[in-house]
Amino acid sequence: MTPPYLTLAEVEAIAREAHRDQRDKAGRPYTEHLAAVAEGVRARGGDDGQIAAAWLHDAVEDGALTRRWLDEAPLPARVKEMVLAVTKRDGEDLGAYTGRILATPGALLIKEADLAHNTDPARLAVLDPAVRTRLTAKYAQVRGLLGLPGAN
């Protein structure tokens, strides 16, 4: 018998609540980024598990939800694995990080949607030029390690 899992709407509500007081580097509500990544996953043909992981993709990394919460959450193991795959760990080099994403089924699509939103010219345009330059280089390096094309 399949255990009762959180619905996609419940996952979205949890993510929105967990990140409700956070702002992105441009000062926008962080939940806008989560919604854009979830929509990007959907638009790229992602399934409900990938969309759920997209809503939660930064929750553990940002401290909005704990690793213990994720471990105990009524979510399929696959969703948890994807969330953890895209969660950057303290001191982790990009090779290990991107290798884990590539090794986890379904995770690459989430990271692709995340990078697409992070490199949206409209989002980057409002950043300080030094921050914009640093992030653009970082995102290009990650895209290269993941084998993704350089443009959105």
Image: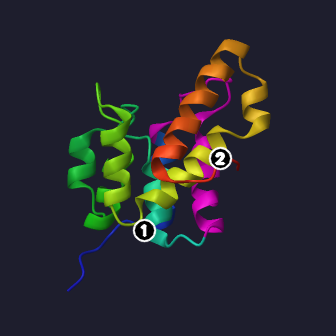
User: In screen coordinates, is 140 left or right of 65?
Assistant: right
Give the number of the disc on residue 63.
Answer: none
**Three-letter residue code for mark 2:** Gly
The tag earlier along the polypeptide, 1 or 2, is: 1
User: In screen coordinates, is 135 left or right of 121?
Assistant: left
- Residue topped by disc 1: 49
Tell me residue 83's x, y (percent): 36, 52
Label 2, secondary structure: give it: loop
Give the number of the disc on residue 150.
Answer: 2
Q: Is residue 133 magenta?
A: no
The answer for how far apart the CA atoms under marks 1 and 2 are is 26 Å
Question: Residue 105, located in which quarter of the rendered image?
Answer: bottom left
Q: Residue at x 73, y 33 (%)?
A: 123
Q: Is residue 54 above or below residue 139?
A: below
Q: Nearer the viewer, residue 25 or 102?
A: 102
Q: Residue at x 56, y 47 (%)?
A: 114
Q: Nearer the viewer, residue 45 or 22?
A: 45
Tell me residue 109's x, y (percent): 51, 60
Q: Is residue 94 above or below residue 73?
A: above
Tell me residue 35's x, y (percent): 61, 50
Residue at the far bottom in the pictured view:
1
Is residue 10 something that shows in the picture?
Answer: no
Q: Is residue 42 magenta?
A: yes
Boundaries of the magenta span: 18-44
**Three-letter residue code for mark 1:** Gly
